[in-house]
Amino acid sequence: MRDSSIPTSFTTPAELLECLAAHGYVAEDALAMSVFLAVRMGRPLLLEGAPGVGKTLLARTLAEVFETRLIRLQCYEGLDLGQAAYEWNYPKQLLELQSRRTSDRGEGTEGLFADAFLLRRPLLQAIDASNDRPPVLLVDELDRSDEEFESFLLELLSEFQITIPELGTLRAAHRPIVILTSNRTRDVHDALRRRCIYHWIDYPPFEKEVEIVRLKVPGLSQHVARRVVDFTQRLRHEDLAKPPGVAETVEWAEALRVLAVTDLEPTTVSATLGLVLKYHDDVETVRKQLLTRLLDAGAA
């Protein structure tokens, strides 16, 4: 069931699409539909796609749209409950014990496992009962975490509660808007997928990517924007270790705006490839083998 405190500034996916665009995020109709249903149905949204297609940015934009807090959990190998949900502030507890000894208040542990000594990590922050409205919880790059963490997350997303042995079960007063992202370095377990609304974010079509570039880099000419997008989209069809994402397209476009470029010339492109490609072998391959062909194809 949808949380009643979620703002209802939009009533259709089309209105949400316009709202996202007003905050600088250009989305496809299908993505707007998935986000709309995830928010209205209170379901987590699992986003998969290549790096740089806007998965993380969507969560940030939703926090702006709903005027709420963004809580981000960056996943990595070895992530555990203490780093993701909570842990006790042992230095603070030790100082309290020392203070009790010096002030003749005894050495008992009463009250040491209380809220004042609890360190709230992102997952616990997201279900904190003190939240006055649902935050956006971004679990970023879930595929980088271990399966053990994924199992714990599965339990959390089922009940939106966390049990702390010393305190009991803490439940969300307002169910967070949950966005999970994956770059598919490994498969996310089917049990977690079943609890989510799933959406694959692909590279945008040509005109949509031009629209994104023009929105993000307003000082860039239409001609250069189209040439930039054409070049990066052609790069994605080449055998590269890391094809450029939309984020790289925008970053490159911004650099060309700073340089006051009026057209793509081989010298300029070669000198700025580090904004588009992030591996040395890819840069050298494009410079030595692909640059002229890709530029000529775009100019044709």
Image: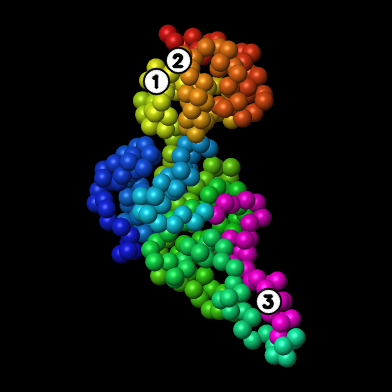
Q: Is residue 109 above or below residue 216?
A: below
Question: What residue is disc 2 on?
Answer: 262
Number of residues whose C-alpha sits closer than 10 Å to that of mark 3, classed few (under 14), some (14–19) or many (20 or more): some
Secondary element type, mark 1: loop
Question: What residue is disc 3 on?
Answer: 93
Left or right: 274 as drawn, with respect to 247: right
Q: Can you give x and y, in whole percent of width and height, for residue 128 in the image?
A: 47, 68
Left or right: 42 as drawn, with respect to 282: left
Residue at the image position 38 percent from the left and 39 percent from the top = 24
Q: Is residue 136 above or below residue 116?
A: above
Stretch in magenta:
73-100
Question: What residue is disc 1 on?
Answer: 221
Q: Residue 279, located in which quarter of the rendered image?
A: top right
Q: Is residue 104 above or below residue 183?
A: below
* Quadrant location, the N terminus: bottom left
Residue at the image position 49 percent from the left and 56 percent from the top = 71
